[in-house]
Image (cartoon, rainbow, N blue to C red):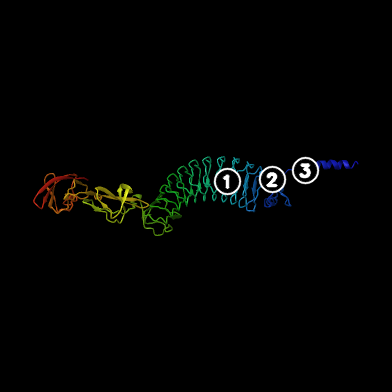
Amino acid sequence: MSCKKPISVFCILLLSMGAFSQNTLVPDDNFEQALIDLGFDTGPLDDMVLTSNINSIPDLDVQGLNISDLTGIEDFTALEVLNCENNLLSVLDVTNNINLTQLFCSANNISTIDISTLLNLQIFWCSNNLLSTLDVSKNQPLISLVCGNNLLKTLDVSQNINLVVLAFENNEISSIDITNNPKINRLQCGKNRLSSLDISQNPNVTYVSCEHNSITTFDTSNNLVLSTLICYSNLLSELDLSKNTSLIAIDCSNNNLCRLNLKNGNNNFTMANFKLNNFLKCVVVDNPSNTPNTWDPLNYQYYVSSKDLCFNTVPIDLLNDFVGISYTLPPLLYGNYFTESGGLGTPLFSGDVINTSQTIYIYNETVCDSNESNFNILITTDDYFIPKYFTPNNDGNHDLWLVNDFSNQIKKIEIFDRYGKLIKYLQPNVGWNGTFNGKLMETNDYWYVITFNNGEILKGHFSLKR
């Protein structure tokens, strides 16, 4: 009997030790096998691991192991770095891992994730998942956020003032405010739905890629250390990079560029691509006669040394003023008819008959610029018409003083200056351009004497305005 007493005490001690031993459930065999391979568990697979073996681990790398369930991660309470990328996770609960500073979970099937308890998180990479929302407002120490290739429609980084890297390409984001992120060095936002991008408050940014958006304007004048700009496939009409002296790579191809200023004092770009800009007729560079032969498109023809030399002329038809009973609008080569300036008012068309006095505008526009001319129609039943003024400045409007003779009653027209000196002798329906002996006449009043075929004489005056 005496020998049984020590054995009973030993059994009680064993039972007591077992009661205080704690296991963590690890139902995913691939996850448990990874822990065995890392020396944190022993075989065989039993869906359990000693909690004491894992609750002090600072770094865990289980990427690319076909893990579909990371249950058990909640007991890795000392974990600072977790890499579970390239697995089959649809759920990832890290709310208990409050010491995490780095979390890498890209290339899974995660649709939601809560990182609000990770107040020390500095690096968070979650690209190539199924995230439709992402709240990083509690993660103020965050310096690197990579969340590309998800289903995000919005992203608020206004609380992440320490961000250095921000990459959210290939989402559905239509606007982003990064004015509260002055430390950003690298920005990747391509393949979204952005119509604008303000980087004026990001003076430290060196790399920007915003390709495949709908951005119409882009100001880089405050980004003096910018070295790479990738902005192809947008809607940019003008791009001025003259302030970006550190820029060595630019791809602004496939936009609507009309003007491009690359004169930054450093035209030895390792890459300069501005092809597929069909309206681009002006590229400002440091030396138009010595541009690198690596630029695309090759053999570009429109290099200039100053933006003042950039002209995008939009052709426009010019028609003379008309005086008569009615007027039929002729066909146009360049432009369309409108009743108001700027392509406004009522559209008119060739063949339309005009029976009321009015000014008609011819308006033409391209993606880059617009141009306009106008002419006046005076509907009258009088036998002749004498204009009261003209403006010979070669703008296509009132450039000639022209007496219209509708019934062939006028024999001759004489023009005198205010001192009675004969300036010009005219036949009816022939205009005067405001010159005498090849010299421009001054702004003033001038007199006319019109002699009719029946001998009657009509005198009067008109104004020349410059």
Nearest the viewer among 425 and 59 is 425
The first of marks 3 and 2 along the sequence is 3
Mark 1 and mark 2: Cα distance apart in space: 22 Å
The residue that appears at 42% across and 45% down in the rendered structure is 221
Nearest the viewer among 298 and 444 is 444
The residue that appears at 46% across and 42% down in the rendered structure is 201
Q: Could you say which disc has been placed on residue 54 in the image?
A: 2
Q: Which amino acid is tagged 3? A: Gly
Nearest the viewer among 456 and 208 is 456
Mark 1 and mark 3: Cα distance apart in space: 39 Å
For mark 3, does the 10 Å Cα neighbourhood hold few (<14), some (14 to 19), or many (20 or more) residues? few
Residue matched to label 1: 124
Q: Is mark 3 in CB contact (under 8 Å) with mark 2?
A: no
Q: Is mark 1 in CB contact (under 8 Å) with mark 2?
A: no
The answer to whether 114 is drawn above or below residue 231 in the figure is above
Q: Is mark 1 in CB contact (under 8 Å) with mark 3?
A: no
Q: Which amino acid is tagged 1? A: Phe
Quadrant the N terminus occupies: top right
Q: Could you say which disc has been placed on residue 198 in the image?
A: none
Single out the residue that lies furthest toward the left: 455
Residue matched to label 3: 18
Q: Secondary structure at mark 1?
A: strand
Q: Which amino acid is tagged 2? A: Ile
Quadrant the C terminus occupies: top left
Q: Secondary structure at mark 3?
A: helix
The first of marks 1 and 2 along the sequence is 2
Nearest the viewer among 266 and 52 is 52
In the rendering, at what x and y percent does residue 331 appear? 28, 56
